[in-house]
């Protein structure tokens, strides 16, 4: 059984439902899903409710054999709960997470683990609200562009 932490599949956001799928995490999920014949699980550190998680999974077409909400961000507790999930599944497998501390704890538990590192770049225009330009500024900009357009060949011999 291969268990993914939800953070591998979704980019961070302020609200759980607003998290968008991560392209690289989904590529890894799909390739392992096919090779493992669907024996993949998901654990979520914190989620408002199981209904919200199930809705997110359905909307993004993620079919997990098992999923659980850990309700903890403590690496030791997370590692213990994931180890128990793997024991219930009947086979120790692979655990994939974005948190180095949890991966280290999983290694202490004797579970093969992989640290998934994702660069998240927030563009300035997405992070801050756009400022509206004043009408006078827009008129001056249009006038400057018209003048530049009419003067582009000014003084050149044809």
Image (cartoon, rainbow, N blue to C red):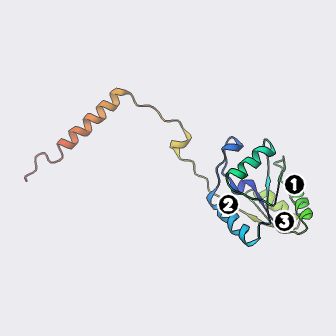
Res. 117 mark: 2
Closer to the camera, 84 or 102? 84
The residue lying at 30 percent from left, 35 percent from top is: 141
Q: Image height check: is 27 above or below 149? A: below
The tag earlier along the polypeptide, 1 or 2, is 1
Q: What distance separates the C-alpha of mark 1 from that of mark 2?
A: 20 Å
Seen in the picture, residue 34 relative to 122 is either above or below; the reply is below
124 relative position to 94: left or right: left
Identify the mark at residue 107; answer none if there is no mark: 3
Give me the disc on residue 125: none
Q: Residues within 10 Å of mark 2 (few under 14, many from 20)?
A: few
Q: Earlier in the sequence, mark 3 or mark 1?
A: 1
- The location of residue 124, given as percent across then percent down, is 52, 44
Label 2 sits on a secondary structure element that is loop
Q: As drawn, which residue projects farthest toward the bottom?
A: 35
Pointer 1: what residue? 76
- Provide residue 114's location: percent of width, then percent of height: 75, 65
Residue 43 x, y percent position in the rendering? 80, 55
Which residue lies at the image location 22% right of the left edge and 42% below the top edge? Answer: 148
Q: Residues within 10 Å of mark 3 (few under 14, many from 20)?
A: some
Quarter of the rendering occupied by the N terminus: bottom right
Query: Nearest the camera: 3 or 133?
Result: 3
For the residues labelled 3 and 1, the Cα–Cα distance comes to 11 Å
Looking at marks 2 and 3 on the same chain, the residue that comes earlier in the sequence is marked by: 3
Alpha carbon of mark 2 to alpha carbon of mark 3: how far? 17 Å
Q: Secondary structure at mark 3?
A: helix
- Which SS class for mark 1? helix
């Amino acid at each position: 059984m291969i268990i993914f932490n939800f953070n591998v599949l979704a980019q961070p956001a302020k609200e759980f439902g607003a998290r968008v799928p991560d392209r690289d995490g989904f590529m890894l999920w799909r390739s392992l899903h096919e090779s493992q014949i669907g024996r993949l699980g998901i654990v979520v550190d914190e989620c408002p409710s199981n209904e919200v998680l199930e809705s997110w999974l359905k909307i993004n077409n993620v079919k997990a054999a098992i999923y659980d909400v850990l309700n903890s961000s403590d690496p030791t507790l997370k590692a213990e709960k994931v180890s128990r999930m793997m024991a219930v599944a009947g086979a120790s497998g692979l655990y994939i997470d974005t948190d180095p501390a949890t991966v280290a704890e999983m290694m202490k538990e004797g579970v093969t683990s992989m640290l998934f590192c994702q660069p998240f770049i927030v563009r300035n225009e997405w992070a801050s609200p756009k400022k509206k330009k004043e009408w006078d500024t827009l008129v001056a900009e249009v006038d400057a562009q018209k003048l530049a357009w009419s003067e582009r060949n000014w003084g050149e011999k044809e």
